[in-house]
């Protein structure tokens, strides 16, 4: 498999974690988002929407959208799992993943931040305040959801759902990396940061982090 | 089951479609987003994040995030299906759904539009331009993806994926309703609007549309 991605793209990072967690080998094909390489014909000509990540299978099939890619990997390579065994647990883990992937990340990705500065002409402080607002608000809700789930009987482990990482952790961890880049306040998020810390001792997460990528920059 | 929702909430609309398509009865509990009822203790006290929809099961369990809710309904009530039978098809349908739910909708929902006007103090024209920019860009990408999928061998039917609605249509249709509210240019989107039209002759979609809801307003 080939993964078109970028070391700092958090949606790409989610898929790298899943591939490493499942022990699936892949070729790492860097596309430099910040330099606009995704908009050049080499990449943009391949896809309907010039977004990362793109996973190409050995048969040449294309998969896009990080959560859809991870669900596919889960179906084709179910062990080790990234979703709980029961429908209720899967629903809760998917909801946690979507709390990041639908409520926090899209408002703060590169193209939205660029629109703020280039089209709306907001200054750097306003842009940073925008980022921090949505990220902090979303992570506070994430924390409350983790608390509610455990109070409602969810497995109470070190990770978002029990004692092993799931799709929820695959989405959370890249978001925390981004939050730190923008110096978002991460205080008072005990369960959330506990899950982050539990993930970051695992090889699959460490190997996938931006600084460990072939295209990493300081 | 009880669905806390709002006639104009497109994430709620997705779940209404799924419930109606699967013939699952539910109590419709309106929460008036525009009046801020979701922020009042009656609703906000129930959930980690005051977002719609919220589905409460007959056992009192809570499900949030529209795509996670629909996946749950699909697992518990698989007939009639809202996902293809094969993993590849499921991945493509999920990716189409996420193209709407992760790339178009989050940037344009009520709280983001409010931040634009209340915090960034943008005028109405700028806010509308923002909406149209992301919506049109996202729908053009959606259209290209439908074309690419058929060219790559996907079932070529009236809907987003073949001859029956799927999770992708559940997400697309509410987005088109929103696009029309904001007078987004929908020209040149043949496959996309064809899928919309195919859906809107079905009872499950007609019954779920905003104007057919108990809390509908003119």
Image (cartoon, coloured by chain):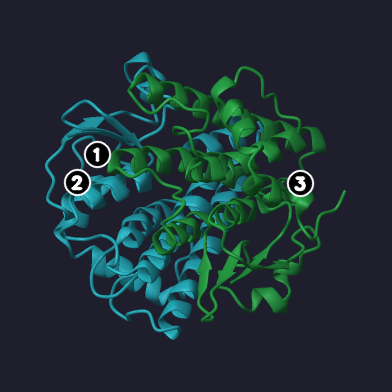
Chain colours: A cyan, B green
- Residues tagged 3 and 1 counted as in contact (Cβ below 8 A): no
Q: Which is more foreground, mark 3 or mark 1?
A: 3
Image quarter of residue A83? bottom left
At a point 47% along the width and 51% down the height, the residue shown is: B80
Rendered view: B186 above or below A148:
above
Q: Which image quadrant: the C terminus of chain A?
A: top left
Q: Position of residue B24 (x, y in %)?
A: 56, 63
The chain under label 1 reads A
Spatial CA span between label 1 and label 2: 7 Å
Q: Nearer the viewer, residue B104 or A75?
A: A75
The chain under label 3 reads B
Discs 3 and 1 lie in a common subunit: no
The chain under label 2 reads A
SS for dot 1: loop
- Residues tagged 1 and 2 counted as in contact (Cβ below 8 A): yes
Discs 3 and 2 lie in a common subunit: no
Which residue extends farthest right? B218
Residue identifier under label 2: A212
């Amino acid at each position: 498999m080939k993964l078109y991605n970028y070391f700092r793209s958090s949606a790409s990072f989610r898929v790298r974690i899943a591939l490493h967690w499942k022990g699936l080998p892949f070729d790492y094909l860097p596309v430099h988002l910040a330099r606009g390489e995704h908009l050049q014909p080499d990449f943009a000509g391949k896809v309907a929407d010039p977004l990362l990540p793109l996973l190409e299978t050995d048969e040449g099939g294309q998969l896009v959208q990080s959560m859809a890619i991870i669900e596919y990997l889960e179906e084709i390579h179910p062990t080790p799992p990234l979703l709980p065994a029961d429908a209720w647990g899967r629903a809760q883990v998917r909801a946690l993943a979507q709390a990041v992937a639908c409520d926090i990340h899209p408002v703060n990705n590169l193209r939205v931040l660029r629109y703020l500065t280039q089209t709306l002409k907001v200054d750097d402080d306003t842009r940073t305040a925008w980022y921090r607002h949505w990220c902090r608000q979303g992570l506070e809700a994430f924390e409350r959801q983790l608390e509610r789930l455990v109070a409602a009987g969810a497995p109470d482990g070190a990770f978002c759902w029990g004692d092993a990482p799931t799709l929820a952790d695959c989405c959370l961890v890249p978001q925390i990396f981004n939050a730190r880049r923008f110096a978002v306040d991460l205080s008072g998020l005990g369960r959330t940061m506990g899950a982050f810390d539990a993930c970051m001792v695992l090889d699959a997460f460490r190997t996938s982090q931006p600084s460990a990528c072939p295209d990493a920059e300081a």
